[in-house]
Amino acid sequence: ALLRCKKPFTMATFNANTIREEGRARELAHCFKQCNIDILGIQEHRKVHVEETQFSRLEGQYLVTSSAWRNLSQAAVGGVGLMLSPKARKALRTVTPISERILVAEFDSNPVTTVIVIYSPTNVAP
């Protein structure tokens, strides 16, 4: 189970503005680990991939992303995801992309813990 009263559990959220480049993704994973975060909701990662949901390992952490999309000028926009500690990855039950802006993950605990990551741009953003 992920959540136990005996051990601290840390969640955070981060508007990445992009982690397409390998260096930026590795920097994020390094900071994630140093801050002892278990689950990090990521908005606007801008990684476009064919799969609906992509799992990857980075610096000993786990990155789960739903694909960003291309705008009219073919620039990558949006994308939501989660970075998970090994403990959180072990407790992960399901990951469901609801839309290109919403990702839902369920974790084993009592009761089940549901994390919803949403990308909601401002009215001046695409």
Image (cartoon, rainbow, N blue to C red):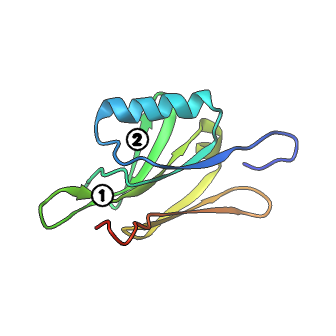
The residue labelled by disc 2 is: 56
**Based on the displayed image, in which of its 4 quarters is residue 48 positioned?**
bottom left
Where disc 1 sits, the SS reads loop
Q: Is residue 93 left or right of residue 50?
A: right
On the image, the x and y values in percent for residue 39 come to 60, 47
Observer-nearest of 103 and 106 = 103
Q: Which residue is the extreme one toward the front?
A: 124
Of the residues shown, which amino acid type is indicated by label 2? Answer: Ser
Q: Write the residue at 31% across / 52% down.
A: 46
Seen in the picture, residue 19 relative to 75 is either above or below; the reply is: above
On the image, the x and y values in percent for residue 83 come to 51, 44
Of the residues shown, which amino acid type is indicated by label 1? Answer: Glu
Q: Write the residue at 65% across / 33% down.
A: 36
Seen in the picture, residue 105 relative to 63 is either above or below; the reply is: below
Q: Is residue 56 left or right of residue 7?
A: left
On the image, the x and y values in percent for residue 38 come to 64, 42
Observer-nearest of 40 and 106 = 40
Residue 51's label in the rendered image is 1
On the image, the x and y values in percent for residue 97 come to 44, 66
The Cα atoms of the two marked residues, 2 and 1, are separated by: 12 Å
Quadrant assignment for the C terminus: bottom left
